[in-house]
Amino acid sequence: GTAAPTGAGARRSLHVRAAQVLEDNWTGSSTVPSRSLYPHQWSWDSAFIAIGLRHLSPLRAQTELETLLAAQWGDGRIPHIVFNPSVPLDAYFPSPDFWRSSTAGRAAGAPRTVQTSGIVQPPVHALAAWLVHLADPGLSRARGFLAGAYPRLAAWHRYLLHRRDLGGGGLASVVHPWEQGMDNSPCWDAPLARVTPAPARSFRRADLDHGAAEDRPTDLDYGRYVRLAADYRDAGYADRTRDFAVEDPAFNALLIASEHALARIAAELGATGTARHTRAERLTAALVDRLWDPEREIFLCRDLRGGEGDESGKGGKGGGRDRGGRLIPERGVSGLVPLLLPELPREIAAALVRTLDGPHFGTGTRLVPSYDLLGEAFDPHRYWRGPAWFNTGWLLERGLREHGEVDRADALAEAVVRTADASEFAEYVDPFTGAACGATGFGWTAALALDLHH
Ligand code: 9WN
């Protein structure tokens, strides 16, 4: 093809274009993932966005996280959406009148003044706060940024490690696929199949006003998402006795990485972080013990409610059922994300790199797909069932670098930056061609390309 511009000119223009996306999506106190599809503040989006924003404005990056933390619930949960009251109710579904956080979430300590959802998203926040601090420690100290964030981040981790340890093995569970952030990943198909969908006429999907139906989850998926969320709401957002409970490798790896970051934050504030580092090491051991599949050489999800009198309960050798529930025999990109962890056993890190390069994720791709190329459910355009996403690319780049795979990390960084720019900062892309899918001008795509470009 035609030679792409190289050198300082190209570098500057990518920087300018990415900065423009983040400027366009900035509301004054936070950044929306997309002006069209997602016109509110999303939890893990904000964490990734802050990581890029710190290169443009450390103050805006700090503010982004502070706005999110201000919507924290009394029980420690950080909601997955903080609603913007000036956006019309029908612009996004489910809207505040569905979640009813300030009434249904009262027992769990939902804030009174701001409307939020009642579920959570992956805990990237302490990691983001630490990286944002490092971008301008002087400003951070002057504003008391870490001192303000620390107790909230600590309460967030406490919530996940206590209220969400539904399997009793030390890991946090998600109670809805939206919590894990890879909504329609085939990893969720089996646990979701047990959920009776809410009738299609009982809700209206606003996402189809902006996104192509064949690139989005199906109506049947939505019926199940709605049922699960409504049941959780109707139980006052109490975490005991959820029918859907899954231990996910990426969610837990991010919790562990954030626990390490929280240890560094504590040390910066003059306390000792040792206990947190030790806990992170213990959690890493639990992750390996409960979710590692040595034959497939990837981490799997554990369906805590699966396997009871269920034929597929035999999935995998022994299915790991002695530890409660069963492992879901599907390869999702989530199972590669633990590469991020510094104290992962050497042989496991090496196995993950093999899987990343091999036929399930590597062969013929430009960026890492969200799901197994050889899996029956693989679809290069449908959301989390195959397309490549930029946040997982960023996490895997970090993991490769962490484990000394410098050449692979450099190549992935380059591919992420080029594909982000060429796709107009798409939400996700065809993993083979890099063709844009979903929204363009997507927040974390711009932010993370900016971060890797630096
Ligand atoms: C539901 C905002 C979010 C991301 C998720 C992504 C998508 C929402 C949706 O958009 O989920 O939370 O409406 O599909 O799957 O990872 O945080 O960008």
Image: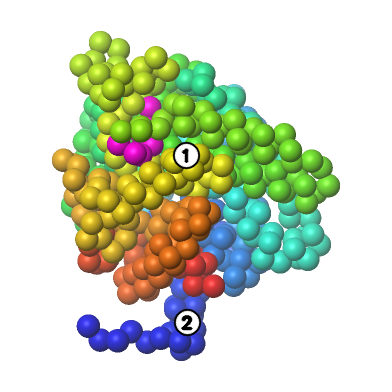
Question: In the rendering, which numbered label is found on residue 251?
Answer: 1
Residue at the far top in the pictured view: 309
Image point (38%, 27%), residue name: 302
Q: Residue 444: image x %, image y %?
A: 45, 60
Q: Is residue 335 left or right of residue 274?
A: left
The three-letter amino acid code for the residue at tag 1 is: Phe
The three-letter amino acid code for the residue at tag 2 is: Arg
The answer to whether residue 254 of the structure is visible from this angle is: no
Q: Is residue 119 above or below residue 342?
A: above
Give the quarter of the figure containing the N terminus: bottom left
Q: Residue 253: image x %, image y %?
A: 50, 40
Residue 310 picture quarter: top left
Q: Is residue 82 above or below residue 239?
A: below
Which of 213 and 444 lies nearest the eye of the viewer?
444
- Residue 297 belongs to magenta span: yes
Q: Is residue 294 left or right of residue 23?
A: left
Residue 30 picture quarter: bottom right
How far is mark 2 from mark 1, CA to CA?
33 Å
Q: Which residue is mark 2?
A: 11
The mark nearer the N terminus, 2 or 1, is: 2
Give the quarter of the figure containing the C terminus: bottom right
Q: Is residue 61 above or below residue 341?
A: below
CB under 8 Å between discs 2 and 1:
no
Q: Label 1 neighbourhood size at 10 Å, few (<14), some (14-19), many (20+)?
A: many
Residue 412 picture quarter: bottom left
Q: Residue 88: image x %, image y %?
A: 42, 53
Give the secondary structure at mark 2. Answer: helix
Q: Label 2 neighbourhood size at 10 Å, few (<14), some (14-19), many (20+)?
A: some
Q: Which residues are magenta?
A: 296-302
